[in-house]
Image (cartoon, grey):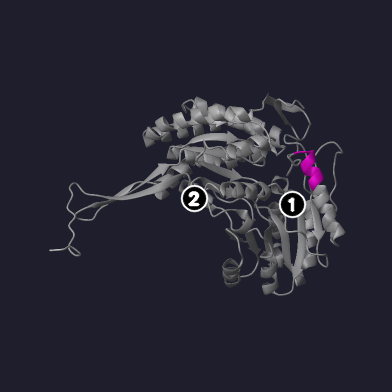
Amino acid sequence: MSHSKLQSMNPATGEVIWAEAITPVAALDGILLTAKSAQRAWAATERNDRIAVAQRFAELALAEKDAFARLIANETGKPFWETQTEVATVAAKVGISIKAQTERAGQSSHDEGSFTRTLTHRPHGVLAVLGPYNFPAHLPNGHIVPALLAGNVIVFKPSEKTPATAAFMADLWARAGLPDGMFQLVFGYGDIGAALAGHDGIDGLLFTGSSTTGLKLARQFGETPWKMLALEMGGNNPLVIWEPDLAQMEAIAALVVQSSFLSSGQRCTCARRIIVQDAHFDAVTEAVAALTHRLIIDAPFADPQPFMGPVIDNAAADHLQAGNAALLSAGGKAVIEQQRLMDDKPFLTPSIVDMRGAAEAADSELFGPIAQFYSASQFDEAIARANATRFGLSASLVGGDSALFDRFAAEVKAGIINWNRPTNGASSAAPFGGIGLSGNHRPSAFYAADYCAYPVAGVQSEGVTETIAVGLKP
């Protein structure tokens, strides 16, 4: 691979599908100067005009849905049916963001008699966005749309594994009428991302990605508390199965499989730890294993349609194989053994590991199709195991009654808590975020409006009427 060009590879075929020059770190000064200049005019633009540009972007995304989704499928290896839903989510984000900004970051005034109390919101200025590879359009889009609506400008550094999708999005914004300099791309690896994050020319950074990178950013931004930093860093998510309806075992298995293996396990909300009541462990595990054996794993456009494709690249597959081997070395037993379907391609079969009796697994996010199964004899024990993590993004209870779920919701530590639903697939119309190592209390989705603008409160009167009634010499 050229040291001066960034190439995007199709993980299902190994073919190069896109190439572009890497952005030199030295170019950041000019890029951010342009962004700062453009932001002044954009912030002064009427809100309705900013909304019109965003709505045009959504229209173009839907008009180009097939090409957009095909590109994402080719760049990530995800099934075409799934990338089509991603494009639809990108378009829907615009309407949701307009509503969120109105409700959470709008303007108001209240007459208090002799004065008026007001509340407005202002953009931060130049916001850097660092995007992930698993949802290369949807996840950065969740930062970009509300930030632009608020009057910020964007400098976007996509994952080096999915830059072509970012270039496609930039073209859509340009065609939608976004002025020059408002949405700029930076291509490259970790060095350009770190340089962008540390540049004096940004007023904040919006990040979705690994906890390793997120912790580095938190330390880096510790010296600049005046800059906005929003972190979403994934999870080591628990799914608890307790007092299940045995007549619904097929549906329960489907819920576990979707939670664990959707997007080849490459969702931050995927269930990593399945915690099952002792009495039902064998029945649940057998049902999940039976369904998992039926999953089609293939290239994005294969017929019949696959449930899942490859993981993002061979390096990720190697890492996951090492992580799976570590679980087995610690005493885990393979219910379904992980397989590399092709030596030179990152196609992995889902792995189910019985962790009963094994040494405690490392509290890390194995970002792929690996499900660890644990058992518990008491619900207190299940809750304790669910909370035995530094992360706190997503959790789900399957089974039980409403009283048991109320207890689960009150005691489990997570920002997303579901009942009889998968751990993944959160709504953009709700806040999205977690606690602990999953984020820094800047939830995204509907609440992204909160970190894309800052509130300005004030009181005004038409004349000066103040008097000092006490504390004066005669």
Which of the marked residues, 2 or 1, is nearer the chain's N terminus? 1
Placement of 8 over or under 329, stated as above or below: above
Nearer the observer, 188 or 425: 188
- Look at label 2 and name its amino acid: Tyr
In percent of the image, x 44 and y 32: which residue is there?
39
Q: Are marks 2 and 1 in contact (CB under 8 Å)?
A: no
Seen in the image, is 159 located left or right of residue 153? right
Give the crowd class for mark 1: few <14, some 14-19, many >=20 residues within 10 Å.
Answer: many
Residue 284 is at least partly visible in this image: no
**Residue 36: which numbered mark, if any?**
none
Placement of 243 over or under 171, stated as above or below: below
Where in the figure is residue 418, as x and y percent of width and height? 60, 60
Placement of 251 over or under 122, stated as above or below: below
Placement of 340 over or under 258, stated as above or below: above
Nearer the observer, 68 or 390: 390
Q: Secondary structure at mark 2?
A: loop
Whether 318 is among the magenta residues is yes
- Look at label 1 and name its amino acid: Leu
In percent of the image, x 76 and y 38: which residue is there?
313
Residue range (magenta): 313-319
* Residue denoted by label 1: 366
Q: Secondary structure at mark 1?
A: loop
On-image quarter of the N terminus: top right
In percent of the image, x 64 and y 28: which residue is there?
24
The picture quadrant where one finds residue 302 is top right
Where in the figure is residue 351, as x and y percent of width and height? 80, 52
Give the crowd class for mark 2: few <14, some 14-19, many >=20 residues within 10 Å.
Answer: many
* Residue denoted by label 2: 447
Whether 187 is among the magenta residues is no
